[in-house]
Image (cartoon, rainbow, N blue to C red):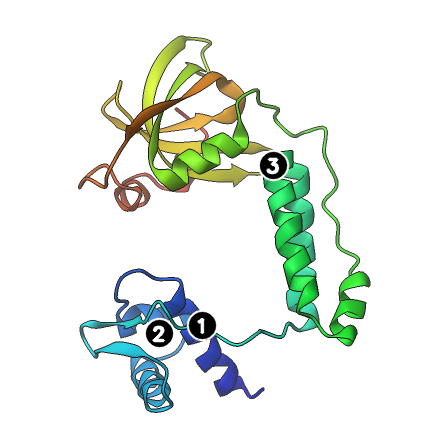
């Protein structure tokens, strides 16, 4: 596969993961090329029958019903997948690790014999570490709450040992070395807060769900609160 063919494939794959139209400038930034090149690539994809709609200056969106043919991985990509699986297994919970193994099984099933041999020869590992900060709450349950936008109630102990009860809109989870964080909107503080999972003493999934509201979205969090401050509540 030529470099341009590979780029065209990756552009389609990039658009496939987006619900809203993406501007040419945003796509160009993702691939490190000029906007003019992106416009030409998009035009060629549309002429080849890929169901992309939109226009320059407005944005592009891919028909959700469109599916790509089976992909082929090179050795670097296979190594990254194996390493990612190893990290998930060592630094999350068994439920999440099981899902990752299931996904890897599907990937293996679509590989050719040569690629399967390369996969078995990968020598990258991420073994469990004593530095992992343990938690008592349901990791997979919290992950699902983020995905389904379900409010949670947590009993939390901050860095000074103070205990509070919080109702939180869980927006994302982030891993920093040995520590997992929940990024969310705290209804007690009426502000964005970061919660270390190892400081959560109890978590309850609430029946209420939430919708995006200006000033309370993950987008707003990332704009206003850089990750460099994220080990503090």
Along the line of sight, which residue is nearer the eye, 216 or 226?
A: 216
Q: Which mark is residue 95?
A: 3
Location of residue 106 with respect to 14 vertically, above or below: above
Contact between labelled residues 1 and 3, with CB atoms less than 8 Å apart: no
Q: CA distance from mark 2 to mark 1?
A: 22 Å
Q: Residues within 10 Å of mark 1 (few under 14, many from 20)?
A: few
Of marks 2 and 3, which one's residue comes earlier in the chain? 2
Q: Residue visible at 65% across and 30% down? A: 132
Q: Quadrant of the N terminus?
A: bottom right
Taking 4 as reference, is 64 above or below it?
above
Position in image of residue 211 (x %, y %): 23, 39
Compared to residue 99, the image places residue 72 above or below, namely below
> Residue at the spot x=40%, y=37% of the render?
146
What residue is shown with label 2? Answer: 28
Question: Alpha-carbon neighbours of circle 3 within 10 Å: few (<14), some, or many (≥20)?
Answer: few
Which SS class for mark 3?
A: helix
Helix or strand or loop: what does disc 1 sit on?
loop
The quarter in which the C terminus is drawn is top left
Residue at which label 1 appears: 67
Residue 81 placement: quadrant: bottom right
Is disc 2 surrounded by few (<14), some (14 to 19) or many (20+) residues within 10 Å?
A: some
Q: Eyeballing the image, is 211 above or below 231?
A: below
Q: Position of residue 163 (x, y in %)?
A: 41, 8
Q: Front-most of 116 and 154?
A: 116
Circle 2 sits in a helix, a strand or a loop, which is it? Answer: helix
């Amino acid at each position: 596969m030529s470099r341009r063919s590979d780029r065209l494939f990756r552009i389609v794959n990039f658009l496939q993961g987006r619900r809203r139209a993406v501007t040419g400038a945003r796509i160009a930034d993702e691939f490190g090329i000029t906007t003019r090149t992106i416009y030409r690539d998009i035009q060629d994809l549309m002429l080849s029958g890929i169901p992309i709609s939109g226009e320059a200056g407005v944005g592009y969106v891919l028909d959700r019903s469109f599916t790509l043919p089976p992909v082929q991985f090179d050795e670097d990509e296979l190594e990254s997948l194996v390493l990612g699986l190893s990290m998930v297994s060592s630094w999350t919970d068994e439920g999440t690790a099981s899902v990752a193994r299931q996904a890897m099984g599907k990937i293996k099933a679509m590989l050719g014999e040569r690629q399967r041999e390369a996969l078995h020869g990968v020598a990258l590992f991420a073994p469990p570490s004593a530095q992992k900060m343990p938690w008592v709450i349901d990791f997979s349950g919290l992950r699902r709450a983020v995905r389904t936008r379900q409010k949670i109630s947590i009993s939390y102990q901050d860095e000074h040992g103070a205990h509070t009860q919080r109702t939180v809109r869980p927006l994302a989870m982030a891993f920093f070395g040995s520590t997992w964080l929940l990024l969310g909107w705290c209804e007690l503080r009426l502000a964005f807060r970061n919660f270390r999972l190892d400081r959560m003493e109890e978590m309850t999934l609430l029946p209420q769900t939430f919708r995006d509201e200006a000033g309370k979205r993950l987008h707003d969090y990332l704009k206003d609160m850089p990750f460099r401050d994220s080990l503090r509540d």
